[in-house]
Amino acid sequence: MKAFAIDELGQPGSVQDIPVPEPAEGEVRVRVAAAGLNPFDNAVVAGYLKDRMEHRFPLVPGMDASGTVEALGEGVDGWTVGDEVFGSVGKAYLGEGTLADFATMSAGTVARKPASIEHAVAAAIPVAGVTALTLADALQLSEGHVMVAIGATGGVGSYLVQLAAGRGARVIAVCSGENADYARRLGAAEVIDYTADDVVEAVRSRHPDGIDAIADMHGDREGVAKLAEQVRSGGHVASAVGAADAEALGERGIEATNVMGMVTTASLQSLAAMLERGEIASPDIRTFPLADAGQAFATLATGHVRGKIVVTLE
């Protein structure tokens, strides 16, 4: 099969011919129509995680995919060959990712793709959408809460802003000025251009009585800590990038947590249903063919992607 793979960490990848993977017990083999990229994928190929986990070469990156079930492993029930599914794998760092004609995925981390959702849209959901859902739950958002979203227009942020606004929160989106209109389209009530304004001062001047929550998708520990000075006692801080100091914030009566979205069939079904009902919309998606996957990774590596990047294989 054709796959985009790297032979050495930190080096450019290429489209290669590699063997088709066989589904293990509890897995399905999916013919991939589209593969969604996440910052984690760039961290893997760039070698940022080389001391934390094993890597195998040729390494095929990618965690998210949408496609068609092509084979079943032992013990798989509920799926048949020909079913259209979307979901995520947890083995991209081992070289068994989704930027390939075929990928093996756990039957517990895929869901049926609704016919009304295109493969590229479905491939943009799993990691980003589930992480956003986990953030929204951790922040315990409700009607009237004021929430600051750091990194509001990236993959996770694009879902999180919509979810928060849908729960009645007043969302303050932190993003570049060029993405301000996009943030408002997602449901942000206010926008702070971090390239032009001091975010902490802007929040303080607009909301002198404080805010209720911070959702961090792109910050750092020091920056989150400074902004958290504006969170009222009893408020919440949640970070998708490990930037919440739970102990220090807890001393101020703020509940803080670093979240990791765990993709499950149920969480994927929930997000797909929201899309079908029109409660949330797909983020902006930029697509690249498999032959240009290297360019897709170069774009991802800038750290300034609006919405999601998806590699198409059909």
Image (cartoon, grey):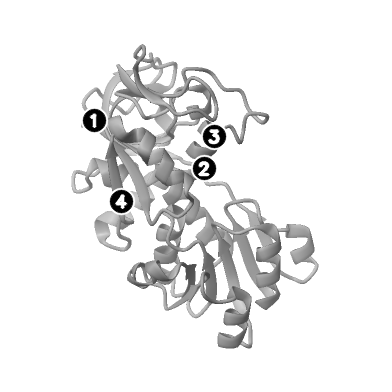
Circle 3: element type: helix
Residue 113 point in image, percent of width and height: 27, 41
Crowd band around label 3 with a 10 angstrom C-alpha radius: few (<14), some (14–19), many (20+): some
Label 4 crowd (10 A; few <14 / some 14-19 / many >=20): some
Q: Which residue is mark 4?
A: 285
Residue 158, picture quadrant: bottom left
Which comes before the other along the chain, label 1 or label 4?
A: 1
Whether pointer 1 and pointer 2 mark residues with C-beta atoms closer than 8 Å, the reply is: no
Which sits earlier in the primary sequence, circle 2 or circle 3? 3
Which part of the image, by quadrant, shows the C terminus? Answer: top left
Q: Earlier in the sequence, mark 1 or mark 2?
A: 1
Name which of mark 4 and mark 3 comes first in the sequence. 3
Callout 1 amino acid: Asp
Task: Identify which residue, 105 or 216, lies in the foreground.
Answer: 216
Please give the residue where the numbered disc 3 appears in the rendered image. 46
Question: Which residue shows up at 22% across the image and 44% down it?
Answer: 118
Q: Comparing marks 4 and 2, which lies closer to the viewer?
A: 4
What secondary structure is found at the residue carrying circle 1? Answer: loop
Q: Are marks 4 and 2 in contact (CB under 8 Å)?
A: no
Label 4 close to label 3 by CB (< 8 Å): no
Q: Is residue 142 above or below residue 119?
A: below
Residue designated by label 2: 262
Residue 255 picture quarter: bottom right
Can you give x and y, in whole percent of width and height, for residue 268 in the image? Answer: 38, 45
Frontmost of labels 3 and 1 is 3
Q: Nearer the viewer, mark 2 or mark 3?
A: 3
Classed neighbour count for the residue bearing mark 2: other residues with Cα under 10 Å, few (<14), some (14–19), many (≥20): some
Q: Earlier in the sequence, mark 4 or mark 2?
A: 2
Please state which of residues 92 and 169 is positioned toward the viewer in this rendering.
92
